[in-house]
Amino acid sequence: MKTFKDFSRVKNWNGITTCNIKASWDIAGYSWKTSLCYVPKDLITEELCSLAVDYNSYDLQYVPEEFKTKKLCFSAVQDDPRTFHFFPDSLITPKLLLEVVKLRGDILKHIPLSLRTSEICLEAVKIKDYNLFYVPKELRTEEICLEAVKASGSNLDQVPVELRTLEMCQEAIKNNGLALYHTPLEIITEELCSIAVRQHHLAFSHIPCEFITKELSLIALKGGSYHMGDVPEEILTEDFCIEAVKICGLALEYIPVEFKTELVCQVAVLENGLALEYVPFKLKTLQLCLIALEAGKDVLEHIPTKFLGYCQRKLENPNISWEEFRDEKNQSRANQEWNLNCGVKEVKYSSQGETLHLCMECLSYEGTKGKVPIQIKPSTKKCFECGKENKEV
């Protein structure tokens, strides 16, 4: 059976049947090249229209009016609300519009303003978030607004101010804590603030100072350390700061310096090693740095120089003690001083270069006292005493 990959290139449709078109869609796939828009009207059937809309609902626009049935149109709009613009006038009635809204709530914005009735709008706000935006202002009654905020608390900003009652705002905040931002100040209560913060930690930044409590602050900190910056000074105590950093160690960044005590800093670093960055320099002890090191090498940049070498060595060898590291460091320093006193420079060379001549050259430096520098370890295992060669047996 003859098939086509591009209907736009077909110049002669004689002899082509609906079977050829369906076969082309099966084999080549349905795309803009094989769209219904290229099929001659005399070949278009109700079956082809149904198949085309199944493949691409937006192609309802190319369906002849006589084939735009209620079933076909509802199938298209369920997939893409924009297809409502291609509905025939016979289907645009209040009754059918209500059915369409129940099927797809976000179609409200595509319905002409003159057809948006209270009944249709009420049904739409129950189903889809943000639909209140598309409800004409004269239709925004208490009933419609209440249903809208129950569906999405973010709809509260579209509710007329005179309708923002305690009941309305409470329903909105239960659904979305951030709705507290759009709640009139005169009706905000401690209970509303508590509901808001428990629902969404970001609501904490919208709470009036007189309603911020220790409990709400600690709840908010579970969502982010930056909330510590919104805590009023009258709540800040050492005990509160300890409770705060137990929940979120990085909250130490926002704690005033006078409350960054040794205990507060230790608790913060125990909770999150990266909090070491915000510890005052004088409180960065070796013990605290080692605790922070458990968070990984990212904390190294916040460790004082005097402890940095040991902490780096600790990452390589977790079992090394401070005393062992200090002995290693002293030994390394002693070796460097010895080389400096002997005037010996470290020279990298291959084992083939370890010749008698090279060893004798090293012995010629003053200060060696006849000893072979520790860098010279000839593979021939020859040692020299005062320039005399003694073969090792």
Image (tube, helix red, strand yellow):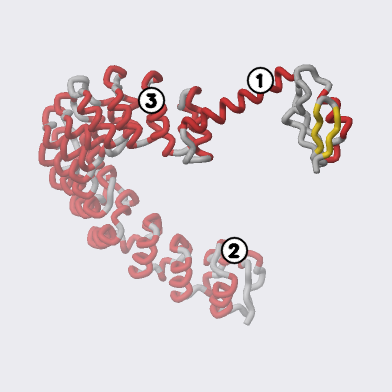
Q: Would residue 371 appear left or right of 222 to someone viewing this image? A: right
Tag of residue 273: none
Give the CA separation, mark 1 to mark 3: 38 Å
SS type, badge 1: helix
Give the CA separation, mark 1 to mark 2: 82 Å
The residue under label 2 is: 33
Give the CA separation, mark 2 to mark 3: 62 Å
SS type, badge 3: helix
Query: Which numbered disc flags the more N-terminal residue, 1 or 2?
Result: 2
The residue under label 3 is: 278
Could one spot residue 345 in this view of the protein? Answer: yes
Query: Which numbered disc flags the more N-terminal residue, 1 or 3?
Result: 3
SS type, badge 2: helix
Who is closer to the viewer here, 179 or 41? 179
Q: Would residue 34 appear left or right of 68 to someone viewing this image? A: right
Q: Position of residue 282 (x, y in %)?
A: 38, 18
Q: Would residue 203 appear left or right of 186 to someone viewing this image? A: right
Measuring 24% from the left and 53% from the top, which residue is drawn there?
124
Quadrant for the C terminus, please: top right
Measuring 70% from the left and 19% from the top, which residue is drawn there?
340
The residue under label 1 is: 337
Could one spot residue 181 in this view of the protein? Answer: no
- Quarter of the image for residue 343 reads top right
Q: Residues within 10 Å of mark 3 (few under 14, many from 20)?
A: many
* Residue kind at label 1, given as amino acid type: Glu
Asked if marks 1 and 3 touch (Cβ < 8 Å), the reply is no
Q: Position of residue 46 (x, y in %)?
A: 44, 74
